[in-house]
Image (cartoon, rainbow, N blue to C red):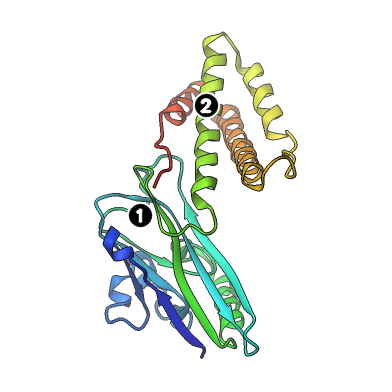
Amino acid sequence: MPEITLETGDWILHGIDLIDYSRPGFVGSMPPSVKALAREFSEVFPYCFILRNYSSHQIAACFSMWQYSDASGKMQTIGNGRINISTFGAPDAIPAGGSRLMTPVLPAECTCSLLPATLSAIRFSVLSRFSGQRSVTMSLDAAILDDGTLLGPDTRRAGQRIQARVAARHDLAANLLKAIEEGAGVSELASRLDQIATAPPPDKHGGPAAQAAYRSNYWSARRGQAFGYSHILATRGSETLLRALRRSAEGLPEIHR
């Protein structure tokens, strides 16, 4: 087994505790939905850590990283994150007093509904990637609270990506609500949503890299939201769409330090 390290940094000063497999109570700190996987995932747990939220805020998004080196010293990095922007106070955010098992494969709460064969494949994926390495270093790169506060080094620019998605969600809903107020019917709304959902991606090479990344994330979020609204309109009707648009148009906090 490689040397495994969890970089805890100063997260505890923000009310966020990072717990690795070597600490007593690791299993006891797991979310209840994950404890059922303790036996199946026992070999994987050393490459995971638990994020426990002792702050007074919900955590709307968080991003973790795994850096590992082989026998020659070559370093590689992978990341994984969970994002919730449907509303910064939604139930699937990490609540105050709650916890999440942070894994290098996928959000662990999703694994509870997977078939045994899939769980076996996930276990194989993690072990084949890490077990032969010389060292593995885990860290929490960024966390975004429900008031928009961005914590952590954010080397992957999570804050920028989230801000782009929040802006896209708000702008699209506001524009559609304005169209409805001006008399747009179901067919016109469907046409507008189809145009947005099928619009080509923006030029990735125009302007500074940060601006290009923002445009790309904005386009992706706007496109995905348009698909969702189209489905609501087609299957549940315009009144349900209107309620969804009003919720989406509510102001969300700016991402800030």
**Image check: 58 left or right of 166?**
left
The x and y percentages for residue 119 are 54, 73
In this rendering, the answer to whether 45 lies above or below 15 is below
- Which of the pair 125/168 is nearer the observer? 168
Res 40 seen here: no
**Residue 110, above or below 132:** above
Q: Is mark 2 on a helix, strand or loop?
A: helix
| Type of the residue with mark 1 | Ile
SS class of the residue under badge 1?
Answer: loop
For the residues labelled 2 and 1, the Cα–Cα distance comes to 26 Å
Residue drawn at (54%, 47%) of the image? 161
Could you tell me residue 244's position as x and y percent? 47, 29
Q: Name the residue under label 2.
A: 173
Please name the residue shown 48% across and 79% down the image. Answer: 44
Q: Name the residue under label 1.
A: 94
Q: How far across and down, in percent of the image, does residue 149 sit?
A: 37, 47
